[in-house]
Amino acid sequence: MRKTMAVLLLIASPVIAATPAGLKKRVAVMDMSMAATAMAQPTGGGGTTFTSTIQIPPPADFAMALTEILTTELAKTGRVIVLERKAMSDIAAEHELAAGGKANPETAARSGAIIGAQYLIRSAISEYSYSQTGTSGSLKVIKGINLGATVLRAQVGIDTRVYDALTSEVIASATSHGTATSSGADVKLSNARMDASAAGFVTTPLGRASREALDGTVRFIIAKLGEAKWEARVIRAEGAQIYVNAGEEAGVENGQTFGVYRAAEALIDPASGVNLGTPDKQVAVVRITNVTPKYSIAELVSGESPKRNDILRPQQRGANP
């Protein structure tokens, strides 16, 4: 499986320059699923003058590998903070070491320390078509793909939803597509299982189609997250210093001003008892004076002193408490 991931990661190419671009949201990528249905396997006549088409099944760990690639490519953009979710079993094992007293308590992982995501990414492979077409005598996909009068065609479609981790609201959805074809001397893959760890997989039409679809997916996610709201929280206020839980890694810079908002009582529908949301009101404006990688320090510009868990949002022009 690790070999599969290592080889498949090679098919991803940088799609957006890895440079900071404003305030960054915390995101987590969920496991990609294989939603595409299996296609029929049409066959043609015999002899050398007729052609046949064989549908090639998905490579081993195809959806899992594309999840790894998507996570890696999002992190490489430098425009979001990507939280690890694929390796939660490893993280849980580390916490169990601490809970069982097998790790130094001063350095062990602490329960409740996992950072929460602001937005979640859910993708599914909704279109999959990988076929070999050629003369009857050249079609030997069970034991490998032969050269000769044969063509490989691949099409991959990825459905993606971006949703708010707090409210579950879907803020954007789209489908990205990738297609590729190879023929003649380009058809060099020879692997009985057609799995993703095959040495030549990265140059096959399926590898190229997957890369194209993933490129579109990354562009879509980054564009939509750029439009989504950004929030941080007040850690505590000590005298003139206000500590905020977002720093250099989140794109915060000295001199930036933020509105401070405080949640009011939740709105409960008297008829159904359903929580309709929690309104908030602006209580202050703060200015960042010092930035560290993980947190920043602000000063009060106007309004009342912030409290722990108050919300910070980029200050809109003309908005004052």
Image: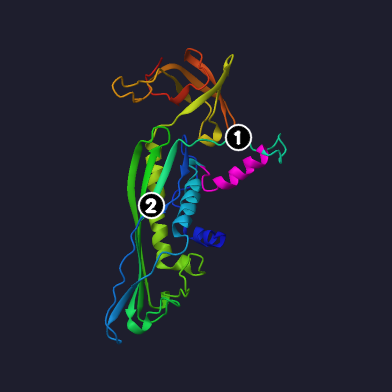
Q: Sequence order check: which comes first, mark 1 or mark 2?
A: 1
Residue 206, picture quadrant = bottom left
* Image quarter hosting the N terminus: bottom right
- Name the foreground residue: 169 vs 175: 169
Residue 107, compared with residue 125, is above or below; it is above
SS for dot 2: strand
Closer to viewer: mark 1 or mark 2: 1
Magenta residue span: 83-99
Q: Amino acid at mark 1?
A: Ser
Going by the image, does 272 lie left or right of 7? left
Residue 227, compared with residue 284, is above or below; it is below
Asked if the magenta segment contains residue 96, the reply would be yes
Q: Residue furthest top?
A: 304
Q: Main SS type for the magenta part?
A: helix
- Residue 54 location (% of width, % of height): 34, 73
- Name the foreground residue: 268 vs 249: 268
Residue annotated with mark 2 = 124
- Name the foreground residue: 97 vs 317: 97
Residue annotated with mark 1 = 111
* Image quarter hosting the C terminus: top left
Going by the image, does 294 lie left or right of 137? right
How crowded pointer 2 is (Cα within 10 Å; few <14, some 14-19, many 20+) is rated as many
